[in-house]
Image (tube, rainbow, N blue to C red):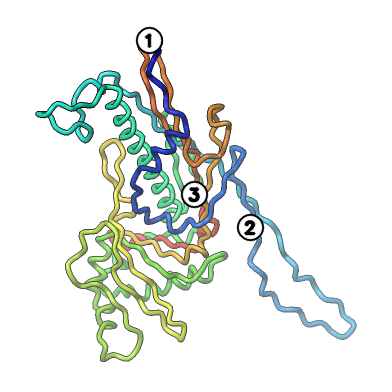
Protein backbone atom coordinates (compact mmCIF):
# COMPACT_ATOMS: atom_id res chain seq x y z
CA UNK A 1 0.00 0.00 0.00
CA UNK A 2 1.31 3.49 -0.86
CA UNK A 3 2.29 5.76 2.01
CA UNK A 4 -0.64 8.21 2.47
CA UNK A 5 1.50 10.69 4.37
CA UNK A 6 2.67 13.82 2.60
CA UNK A 7 4.68 16.73 3.97
CA UNK A 8 3.13 20.17 3.64
CA UNK A 9 4.65 22.29 0.92
CA UNK A 10 5.55 25.95 1.50
CA UNK A 11 2.44 27.01 -0.43
CA UNK A 12 0.25 25.04 1.98
CA UNK A 13 2.08 26.46 5.01
CA UNK A 14 1.56 30.02 3.77
CA UNK A 15 -2.11 29.17 3.39
CA UNK A 16 -2.16 28.28 7.08
CA UNK A 17 -0.72 31.72 7.82
CA UNK A 18 -3.64 33.39 6.07
CA UNK A 19 -6.06 31.59 8.37
CA UNK A 20 -4.53 33.07 11.54
CA UNK A 21 -5.88 36.07 13.44
CA UNK A 22 -3.36 38.96 13.71
CA UNK A 23 -2.85 40.80 16.98
CA UNK A 24 -2.80 44.60 17.35
CA UNK A 25 0.85 45.66 17.10
CA UNK A 26 1.16 49.15 18.64
CA UNK A 27 4.77 49.92 17.71
CA UNK A 28 4.25 48.75 14.15
CA UNK A 29 2.63 52.12 13.35
CA UNK A 30 6.08 53.75 13.31
CA UNK A 31 7.39 51.45 10.56
CA UNK A 32 5.50 52.36 7.41
CA UNK A 33 8.14 51.34 4.85
CA UNK A 34 9.52 47.96 3.83
CA UNK A 35 12.80 46.73 2.43
CA UNK A 36 14.09 43.28 1.48
CA UNK A 37 17.80 42.72 1.06
CA UNK A 38 19.27 40.09 -1.23
CA UNK A 39 22.40 39.99 0.93
CA UNK A 40 23.10 39.46 4.62
CA UNK A 41 23.28 43.24 5.19
CA UNK A 42 20.81 46.13 5.30
CA UNK A 43 22.37 49.37 3.99
CA UNK A 44 21.13 52.98 4.26
CA UNK A 45 22.52 56.39 3.40
CA UNK A 46 21.46 59.74 4.86
CA UNK A 47 22.11 63.23 3.54
CA UNK A 48 22.53 66.09 6.03
CA UNK A 49 19.76 68.60 6.67
CA UNK A 50 19.95 71.56 4.30
CA UNK A 51 22.31 74.16 5.75
CA UNK A 52 20.98 77.51 7.02
CA UNK A 53 24.34 79.18 6.45
CA UNK A 54 24.22 82.87 5.52
CA UNK A 55 26.13 84.19 2.54
CA UNK A 56 29.21 86.08 3.84
CA UNK A 57 29.84 89.80 3.39
CA UNK A 58 32.88 90.78 1.33
CA UNK A 59 34.33 94.06 0.14
CA UNK A 60 33.89 95.08 -3.50
CA UNK A 61 35.98 92.84 -5.78
CA UNK A 62 36.53 90.49 -2.83
CA UNK A 63 36.21 86.73 -3.07
CA UNK A 64 33.46 84.75 -1.34
CA UNK A 65 33.46 81.54 0.68
CA UNK A 66 31.84 78.20 0.03
CA UNK A 67 28.64 77.13 1.79
CA UNK A 68 28.14 73.73 0.13
CA UNK A 69 28.67 71.07 2.81
CA UNK A 70 26.68 68.07 1.59
CA UNK A 71 28.08 64.68 2.52
CA UNK A 72 26.63 61.21 2.76
CA UNK A 73 26.59 59.15 5.97
CA UNK A 74 26.27 55.41 5.46
CA UNK A 75 24.75 52.90 7.89
CA UNK A 76 24.96 49.12 7.73
CA UNK A 77 23.00 46.62 9.83
CA UNK A 78 23.10 42.85 9.83
CA UNK A 79 19.84 41.16 10.84
CA UNK A 80 19.84 38.40 13.44
CA UNK A 81 17.92 35.29 12.45
CA UNK A 82 14.79 34.33 14.37
CA UNK A 83 13.81 30.65 14.31
CA UNK A 84 11.05 28.72 16.04
CA UNK A 85 11.09 24.95 15.63
CA UNK A 86 9.14 22.12 17.21
CA UNK A 87 8.66 18.43 16.65
CA UNK A 88 5.19 16.99 16.17
CA UNK A 89 4.78 14.30 18.81
CA UNK A 90 3.99 11.07 16.87
CA UNK A 91 1.62 9.95 19.65
CA UNK A 92 -0.46 13.15 19.84
CA UNK A 93 -2.74 12.29 16.88
CA UNK A 94 -3.78 9.06 18.68
CA UNK A 95 -5.41 10.74 21.70
CA UNK A 96 -7.98 13.40 22.54
CA UNK A 97 -6.76 16.94 21.80
CA UNK A 98 -8.41 20.01 23.41
CA UNK A 99 -9.66 22.47 20.82
CA UNK A 100 -9.66 19.79 18.13
CA UNK A 101 -11.85 16.97 19.36
CA UNK A 102 -15.44 17.69 20.37
CA UNK A 103 -15.21 16.39 23.97
CA UNK A 104 -13.64 13.76 26.17
CA UNK A 105 -16.92 11.93 26.77
CA UNK A 106 -18.03 11.74 23.15
CA UNK A 107 -15.52 9.90 21.00
CA UNK A 108 -14.35 11.90 18.01
CA UNK A 109 -14.83 10.63 14.49
CA UNK A 110 -11.49 12.12 13.43
CA UNK A 111 -8.88 9.75 12.11
CA UNK A 112 -5.30 10.10 13.40
CA UNK A 113 -4.25 11.66 10.09
CA UNK A 114 -7.06 14.23 10.23
CA UNK A 115 -6.19 15.05 13.83
CA UNK A 116 -2.50 15.38 12.83
CA UNK A 117 -3.38 18.00 10.19
CA UNK A 118 -5.33 20.05 12.76
CA UNK A 119 -2.51 19.75 15.32
CA UNK A 120 -0.06 21.08 12.72
CA UNK A 121 -2.43 23.92 11.95
CA UNK A 122 -2.52 24.99 15.62
CA UNK A 123 1.24 24.68 15.96
CA UNK A 124 1.93 26.81 12.87
CA UNK A 125 -0.48 29.51 14.02
CA UNK A 126 1.24 29.71 17.41
CA UNK A 127 4.68 29.75 15.80
CA UNK A 128 3.67 32.59 13.50
CA UNK A 129 2.41 34.64 16.45
CA UNK A 130 5.65 33.99 18.34
CA UNK A 131 7.68 35.37 15.42
CA UNK A 132 5.38 38.38 15.05
CA UNK A 133 5.69 39.08 18.80
CA UNK A 134 9.47 39.06 18.39
CA UNK A 135 9.02 41.57 15.56
CA UNK A 136 6.95 43.76 17.87
CA UNK A 137 9.61 43.48 20.59
CA UNK A 138 12.27 44.60 18.08
CA UNK A 139 10.09 47.51 16.90
CA UNK A 140 9.46 48.56 20.51
CA UNK A 141 13.16 48.47 21.39
CA UNK A 142 14.06 50.40 18.23
CA UNK A 143 11.59 53.17 19.07
CA UNK A 144 11.94 53.23 22.88
CA UNK A 145 15.68 52.54 23.27
CA UNK A 146 16.90 53.37 19.74
CA UNK A 147 18.93 50.16 20.07
CA UNK A 148 18.22 46.44 19.91
CA UNK A 149 20.21 43.86 21.88
CA UNK A 150 20.08 40.41 20.29
CA UNK A 151 21.04 37.70 22.80
CA UNK A 152 21.73 34.32 21.22
CA UNK A 153 21.08 30.89 22.70
CA UNK A 154 24.78 30.44 23.55
CA UNK A 155 24.69 33.57 25.74
CA UNK A 156 26.58 35.87 23.38
CA UNK A 157 24.91 39.11 22.33
CA UNK A 158 25.24 41.95 19.85
CA UNK A 159 23.85 45.48 20.12
CA UNK A 160 22.44 47.24 17.07
CA UNK A 161 22.63 50.95 17.94
CA UNK A 162 20.59 53.34 15.78
CA UNK A 163 22.53 56.32 17.22
CA UNK A 164 19.89 58.52 18.81
CA UNK A 165 21.39 61.69 20.29
CA UNK A 166 22.57 60.87 23.85
CA UNK A 167 20.57 63.74 25.34
CA UNK A 168 17.32 62.20 24.13
CA UNK A 169 17.44 59.32 26.60
CA UNK A 170 16.87 60.61 30.12
CA UNK A 171 16.45 59.26 33.65
CA UNK A 172 15.08 61.80 36.11
CA UNK A 173 16.54 61.82 39.60
CA UNK A 174 14.97 62.39 43.01
CA UNK A 175 13.37 65.82 43.28
CA UNK A 176 12.98 66.20 39.51
CA UNK A 177 10.58 63.35 38.80
CA UNK A 178 6.97 63.81 37.74
CA UNK A 179 4.84 64.13 40.85
CA UNK A 180 7.68 65.53 42.98
CA UNK A 181 7.04 68.84 44.71
CA UNK A 182 7.69 71.85 42.47
CA UNK A 183 8.22 69.80 39.29
CA UNK A 184 6.36 71.05 36.20
CA UNK A 185 5.22 68.16 34.03
CA UNK A 186 4.27 70.55 31.23
CA UNK A 187 7.64 72.29 31.54
CA UNK A 188 9.44 68.98 31.08
CA UNK A 189 7.28 68.07 28.09
CA UNK A 190 8.05 71.49 26.60
CA UNK A 191 11.76 70.75 26.96
CA UNK A 192 11.27 67.39 25.24
CA UNK A 193 9.38 69.06 22.40
CA UNK A 194 12.09 71.69 21.90
CA UNK A 195 14.89 69.12 22.03
CA UNK A 196 13.32 66.79 19.47
CA UNK A 197 12.25 69.63 17.17
CA UNK A 198 15.76 71.13 17.16
CA UNK A 199 17.59 67.82 16.75
CA UNK A 200 19.09 66.76 13.43
CA UNK A 201 16.42 64.73 11.64
CA UNK A 202 14.04 65.37 14.54
CA UNK A 203 10.42 66.47 14.29
CA UNK A 204 7.37 67.84 16.04
CA UNK A 205 6.17 65.59 18.86
CA UNK A 206 2.60 64.44 18.29
CA UNK A 207 2.31 61.50 20.70
CA UNK A 208 3.52 60.57 24.18
CA UNK A 209 3.11 56.93 25.16
CA UNK A 210 3.45 56.15 28.86
CA UNK A 211 3.32 53.27 31.27
CA UNK A 212 0.26 52.95 33.49
CA UNK A 213 2.17 54.21 36.54
CA UNK A 214 2.98 57.48 34.77
CA UNK A 215 -0.66 57.91 33.73
CA UNK A 216 -1.73 57.64 37.38
CA UNK A 217 0.55 60.57 38.25
CA UNK A 218 -0.53 62.67 35.27
CA UNK A 219 -4.20 62.10 36.13
CA UNK A 220 -3.62 63.84 39.49
CA UNK A 221 -1.27 66.59 38.31
CA UNK A 222 -2.57 69.98 39.50
CA UNK A 223 -0.92 71.85 36.65
CA UNK A 224 -2.68 69.81 33.99
CA UNK A 225 -5.97 69.75 35.88
CA UNK A 226 -5.90 73.57 36.05
CA UNK A 227 -5.80 73.67 32.26
CA UNK A 228 -8.99 71.62 32.15
CA UNK A 229 -10.87 74.53 33.72
CA UNK A 230 -12.78 76.10 30.82
CA UNK A 231 -13.02 79.43 32.68
CA UNK A 232 -9.24 79.91 32.29
CA UNK A 233 -8.17 81.50 29.02
CA UNK A 234 -5.63 79.56 26.99
CA UNK A 235 -5.04 76.09 25.67
CA UNK A 236 -7.18 73.35 27.13
CA UNK A 237 -5.48 70.06 28.02
CA UNK A 238 -7.56 66.95 28.64
CA UNK A 239 -6.82 63.76 30.58
CA UNK A 240 -9.09 60.89 31.48
CA UNK A 241 -9.88 61.20 35.20
CA UNK A 242 -12.21 58.21 35.37
CA UNK A 243 -11.33 54.66 36.30
CA UNK A 244 -8.28 53.43 34.40
CA UNK A 245 -9.14 51.38 31.35
CA UNK A 246 -8.61 47.63 31.57
CA UNK A 247 -7.37 47.65 27.96
CA UNK A 248 -3.65 47.16 27.49
CA UNK A 249 -3.54 50.12 25.08
CA UNK A 250 -5.79 53.16 25.24
CA UNK A 251 -5.83 56.87 24.51
CA UNK A 252 -5.50 58.81 27.74
CA UNK A 253 -5.83 62.47 26.74
CA UNK A 254 -4.48 65.37 24.68
CA UNK A 255 -2.18 68.31 25.28
CA UNK A 256 -2.81 71.55 23.38
CA UNK A 257 0.22 73.20 21.74
CA UNK A 258 0.00 77.00 21.78
CA UNK A 259 -0.07 79.13 18.66
CA UNK A 260 -2.32 79.14 15.63
CA UNK A 261 -1.32 75.67 14.42
CA UNK A 262 -3.92 73.86 16.51
CA UNK A 263 -1.38 71.07 17.02
CA UNK A 264 -2.13 68.58 19.78
CA UNK A 265 -0.06 65.89 21.43
CA UNK A 266 -1.95 62.65 22.00
CA UNK A 267 -1.40 60.86 25.31
CA UNK A 268 -1.52 57.07 25.17
CA UNK A 269 -1.02 54.31 27.75
CA UNK A 270 0.69 51.06 26.80
CA UNK A 271 0.62 48.26 29.37
CA UNK A 272 1.33 45.43 26.93
CA UNK A 273 3.57 42.55 27.98
CA UNK A 274 5.43 39.68 26.36
CA UNK A 275 6.65 36.38 27.83
CA UNK A 276 10.09 34.75 27.68
CA UNK A 277 10.54 31.39 29.43
CA UNK A 278 7.43 32.04 31.52
CA UNK A 279 8.57 35.51 32.70
CA UNK A 280 6.24 38.36 31.77
CA UNK A 281 7.83 41.70 30.89
CA UNK A 282 6.48 45.04 29.72
CA UNK A 283 7.41 46.53 26.34
CA UNK A 284 7.40 50.00 27.92
CA UNK A 285 8.39 50.33 31.58
CA UNK A 286 5.64 51.32 34.00
CA UNK A 287 7.65 54.41 35.02
CA UNK A 288 8.70 55.61 31.55
CA UNK A 289 7.45 57.58 28.58
CA UNK A 290 8.40 57.60 24.92
CA UNK A 291 7.69 60.79 22.99
CA UNK A 292 7.44 60.35 19.23
CA UNK A 293 7.08 62.56 16.20
CA UNK A 294 4.97 61.36 13.28
CA UNK A 295 5.76 58.00 11.64
CA UNK A 296 6.83 59.98 8.56
CA UNK A 297 9.39 61.87 10.67
CA UNK A 298 10.72 58.68 12.28
CA UNK A 299 10.76 57.04 8.83
CA UNK A 300 10.77 53.48 10.13
CA UNK A 301 11.67 50.61 7.82
CA UNK A 302 10.73 46.94 8.21
CA UNK A 303 13.78 45.19 6.78
CA UNK A 304 14.26 41.51 6.04
CA UNK A 305 17.54 39.87 5.10
CA UNK A 306 17.91 36.71 3.06
CA UNK A 307 17.05 33.30 4.50
CA UNK A 308 20.25 31.26 4.29
CA UNK A 309 18.53 28.03 3.30
CA UNK A 310 18.52 26.36 -0.10
CA UNK A 311 14.90 25.34 0.42
CA UNK A 312 14.03 29.05 0.68
CA UNK A 313 16.03 29.69 -2.50
CA UNK A 314 17.98 32.30 -0.47
CA UNK A 315 15.11 34.75 -0.76
CA UNK A 316 14.51 37.69 1.61
CA UNK A 317 11.19 36.38 2.91
CA UNK A 318 9.59 37.94 6.02
CA UNK A 319 8.87 34.38 7.18
CA UNK A 320 9.96 31.06 5.75
CA UNK A 321 7.86 28.14 7.01
CA UNK A 322 9.27 24.64 6.69
CA UNK A 323 7.97 21.11 7.21
CA UNK A 324 10.57 18.31 7.36
CA UNK A 325 11.21 14.87 8.80
CA UNK A 326 14.04 13.51 10.92
CA UNK A 327 14.84 9.96 12.00
CA UNK A 328 15.36 6.71 10.16
CA UNK A 329 13.02 3.83 10.98
CA UNK A 330 10.43 5.95 12.81
CA UNK A 331 9.99 9.34 11.21
CA UNK A 332 9.45 12.41 13.38
CA UNK A 333 7.84 15.39 11.70
CA UNK A 334 9.14 18.89 12.44
CA UNK A 335 7.76 22.37 11.80
CA UNK A 336 9.79 25.57 11.77
CA UNK A 337 9.57 29.24 10.82
CA UNK A 338 12.64 31.36 10.09
CA UNK A 339 12.95 35.12 9.70
CA UNK A 340 15.85 37.58 9.37
CA UNK A 341 14.25 40.84 10.50
CA UNK A 342 15.54 44.21 11.61
CA UNK A 343 13.37 47.26 12.20
CA UNK A 344 15.22 50.49 11.53
CA UNK A 345 14.09 53.97 12.63
CA UNK A 346 15.97 55.97 10.01
CA UNK A 347 15.54 59.11 12.13
CA UNK A 348 15.83 58.02 15.79
CA UNK A 349 16.18 61.68 16.86
CA UNK A 350 12.44 62.00 16.20
CA UNK A 351 11.96 60.07 19.48
CA UNK A 352 12.74 60.81 23.13
CA UNK A 353 12.70 58.37 26.05
CA UNK A 354 12.42 59.54 29.65
CA UNK A 355 12.15 57.56 32.88
CA UNK A 356 10.04 60.00 34.86
CA UNK A 357 9.22 58.01 38.01
CA UNK A 358 11.35 56.05 40.46
Tell me the residue at 32%/65% (across/down): 268
Instruction: Determine whether the residue tagged by mark 1 lies in a helix, strand or loop.
Output: loop
Tell us which disc is closer to us: 3 or 1: 1
Q: Residues within 10 Å of mark 1 (few under 14, many from 20)?
A: few
Front tag of 2 and 1: 1
Choose top left, top right, bottom left or bottom right for residue 47. bottom right
Question: Looking at the picture, how far across and down is residue 132, in whole percent?
Answer: 39, 44
Mark 3 Cα-neighbour bin, 10 Å: few <14, some 14–19, many ≥20: many
Mark 2 and mark 1 residues within 8 Å of each other at the beta carbon = no
Which mark identifies residue 332? Answer: none
Comes first in the chain, label 2 or label 1: 1
Of the two numbered discs 3 and 1 on the same chain, state the one appearing first in sequence. Answer: 1
Q: Residue at 42% x, 38% y: name it.
A: 15
Disc 3: which residue:
343
- At 31% across and 58% down in the image, what residue appears? 270
Query: Considering depth in this image, is 166 or 118 the residue closer to the camera?
Result: 118
Kindly identify which residue carries mark 1.
1
> Who is closer to the viewer here, 299 or 91?
91
| Quarter holding residue 124 | top left
Q: Position of residue 112 (x, y in %)?
A: 26, 22
Q: Hey, which residue is sitting farthest top in the picture? A: 329
Residue 278 pos. (x, y %): 26, 37
Percent coordinates x, y for residue 57 in the rendering: 78, 82
Q: CA distance from mark 2 to mark 1?
A: 64 Å
Which corner quadrant holds the N terminus? top left
Q: Which residue is mark 2?
A: 46
Amino acid sequence: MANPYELWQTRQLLGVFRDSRPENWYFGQFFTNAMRSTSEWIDFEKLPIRSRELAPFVKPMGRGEGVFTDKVTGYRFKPANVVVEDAVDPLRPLTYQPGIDASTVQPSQLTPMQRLALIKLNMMNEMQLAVERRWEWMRARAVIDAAVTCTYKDGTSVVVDFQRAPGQTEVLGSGSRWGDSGVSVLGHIQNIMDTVNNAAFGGLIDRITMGGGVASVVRQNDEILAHMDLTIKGGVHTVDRGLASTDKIYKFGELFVGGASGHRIELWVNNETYTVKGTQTRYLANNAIIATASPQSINGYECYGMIVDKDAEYQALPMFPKNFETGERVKVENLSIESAPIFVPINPNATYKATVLA
